[in-house]
Image (spheres, rainbow, N blue to C red):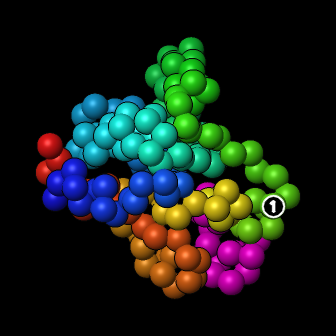
Amino acid sequence: MSLATLRTAIAEGDRILLDTTVLAAFLDASDATHPVARHILADLVASGRNPAVVSMVTVMEILVRPMRATPSGHVTVLAFLRSHPNLECIPVDLQVAQEAAHLRAASRLSPPDALIVGTGLAAQVRHLVTNDHAWAPKLAAMASGLGVVETSAHLPFP
């Protein structure tokens, strides 16, 4: 795959939802999908081409590893989340909770997955960007209207 296929999969102006696997890959240079995640965050999101949102469930999940590693290890991750251009961490509010409850009622998604997708639906994103191969069939079964962009599908990456 190539840069062009990624840019085709995520059209200019499309708002995207980044799941935990993408942020974890961005933060871990040894991850196989790091180059794709780096491009998404550094080029597509930071430039404003594709504004991105992140669920508070994802925030919680990406803070665990650095908190286990060192007492203040999470400070760098929090600084990244607070300051990265065009990246918004969306709190769980009534609208997100309602979207998540609807998803759970209709499809029996786990509470964390329902909150992540509910965040995207409430924020009116066009795509869920992930490296979790289980998302595409889940979202297709729900007819949520969200497209799924799998980062591993764009490897090798320039």
Whether residue 26 is visible to the viewer of this picture, yes or no, is no
In the rendered image, residue 128 lying in the magenta stretch gets the answer no
Residue 43 x %, y %: 36, 37
The residue type indicated by label 1 comes to Gln
| Residue at the image point whose x is 48% and y is 40% from the top | 48
Classify 10 Å Cα crowding around label 1: few (below 14), some (14-19), many (20 and above).
some
In the rendered image, residue 105 lying in the magenta stretch gets the answer yes
| Residue at the image point whose x is 30% and y is 62% from the top | 8
Query: From the viewer's perspective, is residue 83 above or below residue 42?
Result: above
Query: From the viewer's perspective, is residue 116 above or below residue 141?
Result: above
Write down the quadrant of residue 134 in the picture: bottom left
> Which residue position holds label 1?
95
Residue 139 x %, y %: 51, 76
Whether residue 28 is visible to the viewer of this picture, yes or no, is yes
Residue 40 x %, y %: 37, 44
Q: Nearer the viewer, residue 154 or 134?
A: 154
| Residue at the image point whose x is 61% and y is 27% from the top | 82
Q: Nearer the viewer, residue 52 or 108?
A: 52
Write down the quadrant of residue 118 in the picture: bottom right
Q: From the image, which quarter does the N terminus lie in? A: bottom left
Residue extent of the magenta highlight? 101-117
Side (left or right) of 158 relative to 29: left
Query: From the viewer's perspective, is residue 72 above or below residue 41?
Result: above
Secondary structure category for the residue under label 1: helix
